Image: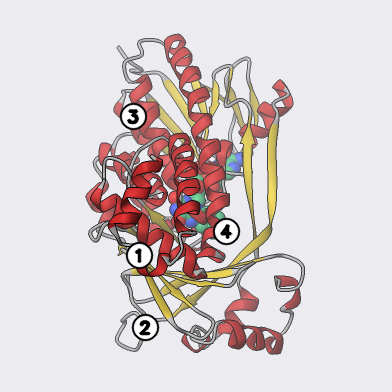
């Protein structure tokens, strides 16, 4: 019988809640989703933070399973490489993977709308402006701001980093949680298109202005614009706290982002109008209590530097579906879910560690000639020995290798490359047989 006719509630119609609702409706459950905000399909302003996101293989696989891969890909911009902009305005390119491999820039609102439309077509009931305020765990009941309490067979909290479901779970079951901000926030800025609606810099790449302790990235949008994100410490020498007026702002941008500044004619207006948002991590030692579970950012929100938050949340849905699709009662469902979530946490912890590590790579190492050479050596070796070496970025982004395995293998690769890169005359012999043999000897 699977989950046929079981009443499942999902708190949050964000990216993960919307996709999860589709998976459960396909399993025959009666799914209701409760969303605090208005319907973003009618209310453009309510689409939420960060305008675009990088979608990659793990997310695409989960979308394919519910039949929306092509529809989603049709509204994306493929990014095949990183283009690094030096302080002098020189450009360096680095392919993300093989020539045909890309990550895809997609509007958060657009993908969320596609998922909500499909969910409703599959019979999911999405109720908007319904903020969940409380949960009764003994009766699996949700309490709302503007609705009478409702009881279900099972409830998922897909309500993001500030999850009320997690907070209630924590209070009732004394969970150990970590909710930590890093000393870096972000602000979005838009590069407009030219008069013909074209992109003013290469549109098949993610652009990075790496500057050590801070950076700007830019992802292309359909329609010719780019969304830039300034990742910058909140306090200190170079930080948001020091840019308090137009003069300081323009002085800072002209010095550090000289080739970007002319592309944003209304920089000052945008900068002082757009919100400054914090970045952080959420971890929790338990994701399941009674008949209530957490999924997506509510239990593993991460910093965005590997572009994995949404992709990982989508992969949660895919793997969860694989795990529970044969269940014939809520009890077997819970047993399988419990085992799955415990294993999954090992991978999402690794995903968060990888995300923190990639901040250093993006803001710092992408400007480092040694690091770029190391990546070239790895790419060449991987091309010759694909069965022996898949670069860390490819494992995370272009495969569904477990995040924890990717982290472990990546650490081993890094220790090998540390030795290789110190080889005398490496700049001249990086693509030689000798270097290839040395790498093979370390494996
Ligand atoms: P959310 O998207 O936060 O959705 C939660 C939903 O729950 C919201 O709709 C909210 O309104 C609703 N809600 C909250 N509380 C309640 C309540 N009490 N009652 C009812 N509803 C409620 N990920 C990537 O994969 N690639 C990227 O390139 C990428 N870039 C990012 C850039 C930035 C700057 C940031 C901040 C994040 C980025 N992410 C990226 C991460 C990604 O945004 C998140 O991982 C993803 O949005 C998580 O989805 P979610 O559905 O779990 O949570």
Quadrant assignment for the N terminus: top left
Colour convention: secondary structure
**Label 3 – label 1 distance at C-alpha:** 57 Å
User: Is 69 on the left or on the right of 276, as rendered?
Assistant: left
Mark 3 element type: helix
Front position among marks 2 and 3:
2
Place residue 289 in its image quadrant: top right
**Label 4 – label 1 distance at C-alpha:** 27 Å
User: Is 28 on the left or on the right of 404, as rendered?
Assistant: left
**x then y, percent, for residue 325:** 33, 20
Earlier residue among tags 4 and 3: 3
Earlier residue among tags 2 and 1: 2
Q: Which residue is mark 2?
A: 200
Q: Which residue is mark 4?
A: 360
User: Is 5 on the left or on the right of 344, as rendered?
Assistant: left
**Pointer 2 residue Cβ closer than 8 Å to ligand 1:** no
Residues packed near mark 4 inside 10 Å, few (<14), some (14 to 19) or many (20 plus) = some
**x then y, percent, for residue 419:** 49, 52
Q: Residue at x 72, y 22 (%)?
A: 172
Q: Which residue is mark 1?
A: 429
**Label 2 – label 4 distance at C-alpha:** 28 Å
Q: Which residue is mark 3?
A: 25
**Label 2 – label 3 distance at C-alpha:** 43 Å
Mark 2 element type: loop
Mark 1 element type: helix
Front position among marks 4 and 3:
4
């Amino acid at each position: 019988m699977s989950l046929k006719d079981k009443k499942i509630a999902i708190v949050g119609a964000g990216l993960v809640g919307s996709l999860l609702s589709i998976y459960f409706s396909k399993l025959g459950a009666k799914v209701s989703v409760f969303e605090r905000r208005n319907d973003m399909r009618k209310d453009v302003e309510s689409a939420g933070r960060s305008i675009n996101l990088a979608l990659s293989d793990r997310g695409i696989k989960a979308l394919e399973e519910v039949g929306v891969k092509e529809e989603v890909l049709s509204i994306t911009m493929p990014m095949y490489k990183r283009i690094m902009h030096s302080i002098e305005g020189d450009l360096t390119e680095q392919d993300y993977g093989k020539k045909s491999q890309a990550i895809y820039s997609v509007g958060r609102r657009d993908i969320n709308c596609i998922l909500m439309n499909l969910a409703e077509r599959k019979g999911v009931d999405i109720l908007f402006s319904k903020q969940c305020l409380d949960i009764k765990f003994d009766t699996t009941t949700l309490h709302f701001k503007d609705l009478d309490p409702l009881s279900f067979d099972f409830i998922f909290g897909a309500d993001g980093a500030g999850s009320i479901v997690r907070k209630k779970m924590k209070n009732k079951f004394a969970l150990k949680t970590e909710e930590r901000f890093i000393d870096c926030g972000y602000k979005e800025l838009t590069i407009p298109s030219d008069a013909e609606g074209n992109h003013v810099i290469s549109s098949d790449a993610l652009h990075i202005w790496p500057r050590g302790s801070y950076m700007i990235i830019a992802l292309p949008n359909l329609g010719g614009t780019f969304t830039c994100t300034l990742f910058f410490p909140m306090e200190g020498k170079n930080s948001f706290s020091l840019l308090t007026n137009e003069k300081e702002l323009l002085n800072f941008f002209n010095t550090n982002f000289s080739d970007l500044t002319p592309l944003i004619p209304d920089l000052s207006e945008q900068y002082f109008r757009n919100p400054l948002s914090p970045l952080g991590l959420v971890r929790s030692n338990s994701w399941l209590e009674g008949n209530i579970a957490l999924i997506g950012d509510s239990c593993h929100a991460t910093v965005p530097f590997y572009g994995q938050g949404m992709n990982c949340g989508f992969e949660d849905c895919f793997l969860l579906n694989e795990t529970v699709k044969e269940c014939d009662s809520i009890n077997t469902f819970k047993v399988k879910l419990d085992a799955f979530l415990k294993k999954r946490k090992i991978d999402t912890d690794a995903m968060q560690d990888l995300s923190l590590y990639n901040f250093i790579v993006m803001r710092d190492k992408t400007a480092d000639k040694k690091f770029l050479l190391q990546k070239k050596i790895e790419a060449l070796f991987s091309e010759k020995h694909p069965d022996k070496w898949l670069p860390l970025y490819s494992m995370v982004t272009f495969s569904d290798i477990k995040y924890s395995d990717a982290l472990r293998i990546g650490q081993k690769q890094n220790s090998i490359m540390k030795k290789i890169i110190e080889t005398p005359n490496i700049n001249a012999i990086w693509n030689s047989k000798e270097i290839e043999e040395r790498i093979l000897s370390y494996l």
